[in-house]
Image (spheres, rainbow, N blue to C red):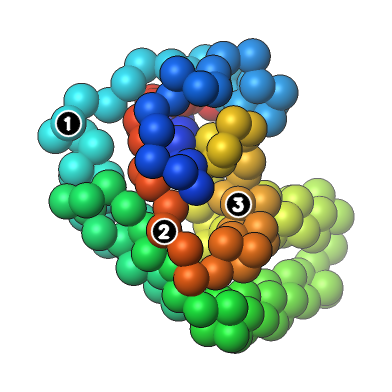
């Protein structure tokens, strides 16, 4: 399955400061990656419903500027708290499932995929799952994040 690795930086600079190659998180969650999206593919992703939905309550994606304007800390906290409760409820639905693997699969996915998003983020020089990225985004509340290159990945 193909999915994107999205480079995001807290400052506006290109990816020559950091290299996505040989990042342990990216290597763990992929079998290969690296082909860069062209400008049309990049814009299509930035304007996509799933990408904008992922940042609902977190920040506003502004595709033409290549930025995400993060909301204030209280708004982000309420969004993440609400999401946490949704995830706990979703996991709890598996409590009576006789398939042990299914219970732990639900937990594992909840811990790595924010809103079931398998995209990876290369944030300020290191790889993150979508959940790792979102759980840290509150520390940048009110700031702009710059969307750099987007890479094709496969697992």
For the point 54% across and 18% down, which residue is it?
Answer: 19
Q: Which residue is mark 1?
A: 39
Image marks 3 and 2: residues in contact by CB distance under 8 Å: no
- Disc 1 crowd, CA 10 A, few/some/many (<14, 14-19, 20+): few
Q: Position of residue 5 (x, y in %)?
A: 46, 34
Q: Which mark is residue 82?
A: none
Of tags 2 and 1, the one toward the viewer is 2
Left/right of residue 89 with respect to residue 120 in the rendered view: right
Quarter-wise, where is residue 61 in the image? bottom left
Kindly identify which residue carries mark 3.
133
Using the numbered discs, state the Cα–Cα distance from disc 3 to disc 2 in whole angstroms.
15 Å
The quadrant of the picture occupied by the N terminus is: top left
Q: Position of residue 37 (x, y in %)?
A: 27, 26
Disc nearer the start of the sequence (3/2)? 3
Separation of residues labelled 1 and 3 (CA atoms): 24 Å
Q: CA distance from mark 2 to mark 1?
A: 21 Å
- Crowdedness near tag 2: few (<14), some (14–19) or many (≥20) residues, C-alpha within 10 Å: some
Nearest the viewer among 94 and 123 is 123
Write down the quadrant of residue 50 in the picture: bottom left
Q: Is residue 7 visible?
A: yes
Q: Is residue 149 left or right of residue 75?
A: left
- Ranked by sequence position, the earlier of labels 2 and 1 is 1
Out of 148 and 23, give the one closest to the viewer.
148
Residue picked out by circle 2: 144
CB-based contact (under 8 Å), mark 2 and mark 1: no
- Viewer-nearest of labels 3 and 2? 2
CA neighbours of label 3 inside 10 A, class few (<14), some (14 to 19), many (20+):
some
Please state which of residues 82 and 72 is positioned toward the viewer in this rendering: 72
Q: Position of residue 137 (x, y in %)?
A: 59, 60
Question: What secondary structure is marked by label 2?
Answer: strand
Element at label 1: helix
Q: In terms of secondary structure, where does tag 3 sit?
A: helix
């Amino acid at each position: 399955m193909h999915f994107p690795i999205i480079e995001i930086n807290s400052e506006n600079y290109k990816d020559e400061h950091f290299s996505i190659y040989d990042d342990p998180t990216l290597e763990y969650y992929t079998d290969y990656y690296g082909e860069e999206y062209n400008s049309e593919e990049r814009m299509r992703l930035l304007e996509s419903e799933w990408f904008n939905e992922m940042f609902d309550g977190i920040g506003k994606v502004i595709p033409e500027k290549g930025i995400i304007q993060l909301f204030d800390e209280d708004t982000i906290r309420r969004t993440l708290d609400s999401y946490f409760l949704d995830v706990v409820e979703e996991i709890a639905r598996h409590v009576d499932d006789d398939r042990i693997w299914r219970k732990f699969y639900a937990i594992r996915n909840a811990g790595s995929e924010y809103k079931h998003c398998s995209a990876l983020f290369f944030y300020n020089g290191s790889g993150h799952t979508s959940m790792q990225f979102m759980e840290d985004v509150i520390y940048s509340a009110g700031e702009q994040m710059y969307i750099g290159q987007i890479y094709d990945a496969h697992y």
